[in-house]
Amino acid sequence: MLKKYIILLVLLVSATVLTAQNLDAERLPDMNVPRAGHNVFYADGELTVIGGHTSGFVLTPTAEYFKNGIWHESPTVYTHDNGMAVVLDGGKRVLLAGGHERNLGIGQSFELEIYDREHHTFEGFGTLERNRAFAQGIELDKGNVLICGNHKGNDCFEMFDGQRFCHHVKDVAVWHSSPYLLPISKGDVMAFGTVWRGRFEPCDTVDRLYGEPFVSPVLKDWMPMPYDQNNHVNESFIGDKEAGDYSYLIAAYNHDGAMAFIHIQDTVFSLLPTTSPVPTSSEWGKIHYNRVAVADRNAHKAYLVGKDADSRAYVVAVEYDKNPAPLTLYYTEPLQDFGDATPVLTPDGDLIITGGILDDNFTPLASVWLLHTGTGKALSETNTYSAWLWILCSLAFIVILLVIAKRIHKPTKPASQPDVASKEMMARITGLMETKQLYLNKDLKVSHLAEALGTHKNVNDYRLEYAKKLLRQSPDMKIATVALESGFANERSFFRAFKAATGTTPKDWVKQNQTKS
């Protein structure tokens, strides 16, 4: 009988397993200037950060480039806090534009300048057609740069001519803050994204450079993660332009806080099927995502970076070329000064996080972290994790215990009846997951499912009783061993459950029971 339960359980959860691995994180030398709202990119193979604001929410007219293991500082002409940067000519030049006009993120500016990567110099030369902050730009043919996006309105498409001047091209149907600008077929470009930041306020209108605006049903329910800095639209690209395949992958979230990946092919938006939901919590608590996904076309993967309350970094890797796409969750130990900042993909396939903030814009960080997602660095300690795999295992255990209890406390029934009852219970569990998609609830707990099923919720009661038995028999056994032997995921969750149930710690409980005996 038990074998049948195990086989059924494996069939139920086989499509939802999420691999989890430890991730190697390396702290690089700090920047010279703490900064947030800055741009970070590779220019001709050289990691560069420009602008933003520093301590006190004060604009900083500085740039830095990383060479020979050292950050070298250069003065900029303007500040570009939450401005835009577009790498031109294969990285030899960078167009910098707009940003906040004053400290504290106030106003928008018209300012334009060019960064010369070879000489590490800056030249201010002109103005935007409209003053902007939270804008984005992409290089088109002949050095032309299409620009769109603004802070709270006053938006349009405008074009930088590759030399000195900008001119108005076309009004937009709605304004976008930190939009996605995605080239599509026939030379057209789409613009879409949030209309404001910091809350769920989806915008389903997609503007086009040449075509008419249209409405995407997917964007009604899912809001793309915004660009807080940079414009790395190319790192969303997963297609093949030579073959006419304009495909992109972006991260998004819904009103309930669930995360997903949106696949875009030309003008068609759809949710990417994945083997499991994107995890929004771990054994240490909630995972907070607030940056865009970065695609590594060489590895056929895209990465979404998050963190928890202990500054433990998480990276969700999705193998987007498979259907459904497998997910891997990487996690680090708690990292000191790991800021909220847009990640940049290195030439080796790793991720760089520069500066950013922990709590507020008045105390940005100078720290630089390298997350070794590339294949050159070894990853260890593989295990399995799923947002609802453990829930299903727990409920299956409940079903088994219920069947056993019925056999012990009730008159014997025909052998077929327990089988029918248990299969019905497992079918109900499957139905709750597949039809109601309960696993998308970030706060889903065993108790919620148990209540929906009408079953007993306290699986931990059985584990705790078994743990007490182990402690009585072997009082010198390590607490971590007792936790794992009793079915807990780790020592921390066991300790918390034990103290909540008994009012004391496992060690004190052992002492008290030894005294009584």
Image: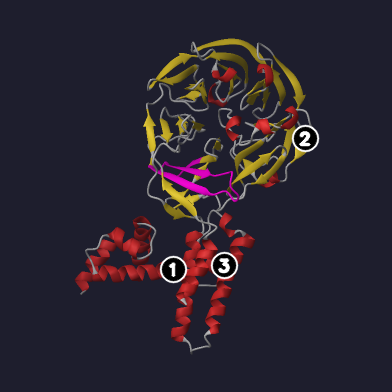
Name of the residue lying farthest toward the right: 212
Which callout, 1 or 2, points to the residue nearer the camera? 2
Q: Tag 1, which secondary structure?
A: helix
- The spot of residue 475 in percent (x, y) is 23, 66
Q: Amino acid at mark 3?
A: Ile
Which callout, 1 or 3, points to the residue nearer the camera? 3
Q: Amino acid at mark 2?
A: Pro
The quadrant of the image that shows the C terminus is bottom left
| Numbered circles on residues, count | 3
**Badge 1 vs badge 2, beta-carbon distance below 8 Å:** no
Q: Residue at x 42, y 33 (%)?
A: 370
- The spot of residue 481 in percent (x, y) is 30, 60
State whether residue 372 is above or below residue 510. Answer: above
Q: Tag 2, which secondary structure?
A: loop
Indicate which disc residue 213 carries.
2
Label 1 packing within 10 angstroms: few (<14), some (14-19), many (20+): some
Compute the Cα span from label 1 to label 2: 53 Å
Range covered by the magenta-colored residues: 305-333
State whether residue 171 is above or below residue 493. Answer: above
- The spot of residue 38 in percent (x, y) is 52, 25
Can you tell which quarter of the image residue 251 is in? top right
Q: Which residue is mark 3?
A: 429
Label 3 packing within 10 angstroms: few (<14), some (14-19), many (20+): some
